[in-house]
Image (tube, rainbow, N blue to C red):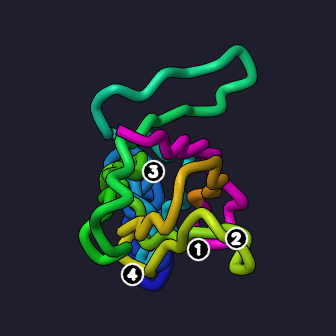
Amino acid sequence: MKKSVIIIIGVIYIASIVLIGFFGMKITAYDEILYVTKIECLNQNTTTSSDGTLTLIFNYDSSKSPEENVLQIEWKVYPEDASNKRVAFVYDVDSKVGSVDKYGRVFLKKKGLLLVYIQSTDGSAVGKTLQIISVER
C-alpha cells in the first residue's frame, strides 16, 4: 500500500510536469517599454535631401507680426504604440529668424534659415532635422 501511494504521487508529479511543458507557461511582459524608432514630418511641400534632412519653404509676410507668421510642424512617431510619443524641438534660441514652442509652432520673425531638430524624449536618441526657409512673398 505504501509503495503504491509513492508511485501514484510520482506519476502525478511527472504528469504535471509534462502537462505544464505541453501547454506551456506563457511569459507575459508587463510595463514593457516601446522606444521610438522613427519620426516622420507630415507637413506638405517638404523635400528630402540625400542625408535625410527635410526642407520646408514658408512664405514670410513682413507686414505681419511673428504671431501671424506661424508655421505648425506636423509629425508622427513610430511605432504608433510607443510608450512615450513626446518630442522636443531643438533649435538655436538666439536665432533672429524665428522660434519654436513646445507644441511645434514656428514663429517666424524675418526671412532666412531656421534649423529645427525634432527629437524623441524617451531616451532612444531618434530625431529628424527640418530646415525651414523663410522667403519674402
* Residue under label 1: 121
Q: Nearer the viewer, mark 4 or mark 2?
A: 2
The residues colored magenta run 119-137
* Residue under label 3: 21
Task: Please give the name of the residue rendered at 66% of the width and 53% of the height, measured from the top-left corner.
Answer: 115
Q: CA distance from mark 3 to mark 1?
A: 42 Å
Whichever of callouts 3 and 1 sits on the residue coming sooner in the sequence is 3
Name the mark on residue 62.
none
Please, what is the three-letter code of the amino acid marked with disc 4? Answer: Met
Q: Main secondary structure of the magenta part?
A: strand
Q: CA distance from mark 2 to mark 3?
A: 64 Å
Q: Nearer the viewer, mark 1 or mark 2?
A: 2
Residue 110 versus residue 116: which sits nearer the camera? 110
Q: Secondary structure at mark 1?
A: loop
Q: Nearer the viewer, mark 4 or mark 1?
A: 1
Placement of the N terminus among the 4 image quadrants: bottom left
Label 4: few (<14), some (14–19) or many (≥20) C-alpha neighbours in 10 Å: few
Whichever of callouts 2 and 3 sits on the residue coming sooner in the sequence is 3
Q: Is residue 125 visible?
A: yes
Task: Please give the name of the residue rendered at 38% of the width and 58% of the height, measured from the top-left corner.
Answer: 62
* Residue under label 2: 95
Q: CA distance from mark 1 to mark 2?
A: 23 Å
Label 2: few (<14), some (14–19) or many (≥20) C-alpha neighbours in 10 Å: few
Task: Please give the name of the residue rendered at 73% of the width and 71% of the height, measured from the top-left corner.
Answer: 92
Pinpoint residue 100: horizontal percent, then vertical percent: 49, 72
Residue 32 versus residue 89: which sits nearer the camera? 89
